[in-house]
Amino acid sequence: MISCDFTKEVKVSIPILEKVRESYQKIRNTLRFLLGNLANLPPEIKSQKDLEEKLDLVDYYILHKLEKLVAESQKNYNEYNFNPVYFSLLNFCINDLSSFYFEISKDSLYCDHLYFQRRKQIITTLYYLLQGLLKIIAPILPFLAEEVYQSIPFRFDLAVPQEESIQLKNYSLNLPLPDNEKELELITVFFLPLRQEVYQTLEKARQEKIINTNSQAHLTINLKGKNSQNYSKLNLEELLLVAKVVVSEKKENNEQMDKSLSSYVCQEYNL
């Protein structure tokens, strides 16, 4: 059982097995989301070469995390250390994908035209995510990996006809990553802390019945002093799922801020 440390005594009970079932279902649902959204590719995408070459910063961020996860998993496999692979995979599916990347991608996937640039960037990212996750789960969840492989809705590179099983396929990941990985600090240092603060603020606003949904909110973000990073590379409205975001580098008097419906001030942040 990969969810247990087999070097110690393994306990089995109904609650433990139920928890394992729930974790398995979360991983399976993550893969279902990927397959479902890759089923409707733009017609011009006929091979991996036709995927988008230039991605958004948040796409590079999630692929960078995937690259680290795959490398870490391969290292643990070589050392017969399966337990960390399982928990790292589960954490990535729940926190990085379901609660973050999938959440901010749904509007484009469900509403944008097939030929819309942002949607094609997301589709490209989902393709590489599927590649990476299959490489991780194939040794420890072979039946799930085979089920996913046989259900891939296209036949190029990742799923070519001559390979009857994922267990017979040996491929290396060639993820499109930014030339300057330092740019990803804009996500880790600025955006993720900001996102947590914004969501706390919006939750309070919903409890006070000021707004019904986050999409009604207008945010004003005050930044302390000068900053050296270009936050304009981030589409904050799309990433925070709100109606409007205004970024100001000058501290304003909160008493003079617009207090109309769905207008809020977040705490000040340094970039």
Image (cartoon, rainbow, N blue to C red):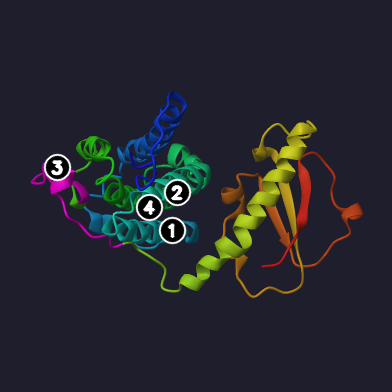
Element at badge 3? Answer: loop
- Are discs 3 and 4 less than 8 Å apart at CB? no
Residues shaded magenta: 158-174
**Residue 104 seen in this snapshot:** yes
Quarter holding the N terminus is top left
Please name the amino acid that badge 4 sits on. Answer: Thr
**Spatial separation of the CA atoms under disc 3 and disc 4:** 23 Å
Residue at the extreme front of the image, as rendered: 9
**Spatial separation of the CA atoms under disc 2 and disc 1:** 9 Å
Q: Earlier in the sequence, mark 3 or mark 4?
A: 4
Q: For label 2, count other residues whose C-alpha is less than 10 Å away and answer few (under 14), some (14-19) or many (20+).
A: many
Lateral position of residue 259 relative to residue 28, left or right: right
Residue 125's tag is 4
Please name the amino acid that badge 2 sits on. Answer: Phe
131 or 9: nearer the viewer: 9
Examine the structure image and report whether residue 171 is included in the region drawn in magenta. Answer: yes
Please name the amino acid that badge 3 sits on. Answer: Ser
- Are discs 2 and 1 less than 8 Å apart at CB? yes
Residue displayed at 61% across by 72% down: 229
Please name the amino acid that badge 1 sits on. Answer: Lys
Residue 165's tag is 3
Q: For label 4, count other residues whose C-alpha is less than 10 Å away and answer few (under 14), some (14-19) or many (20+).
A: many
Element at badge 2? Answer: helix
Q: Earlier in the sequence, mark 1 or mark 4?
A: 1
Q: What residue is shown with label 2?
A: 92
Quarter holding the C terminus is bottom right
Residue displayed at 37% across by 50% down: 85
Q: Earlier in the sequence, mark 1 or mark 3?
A: 1
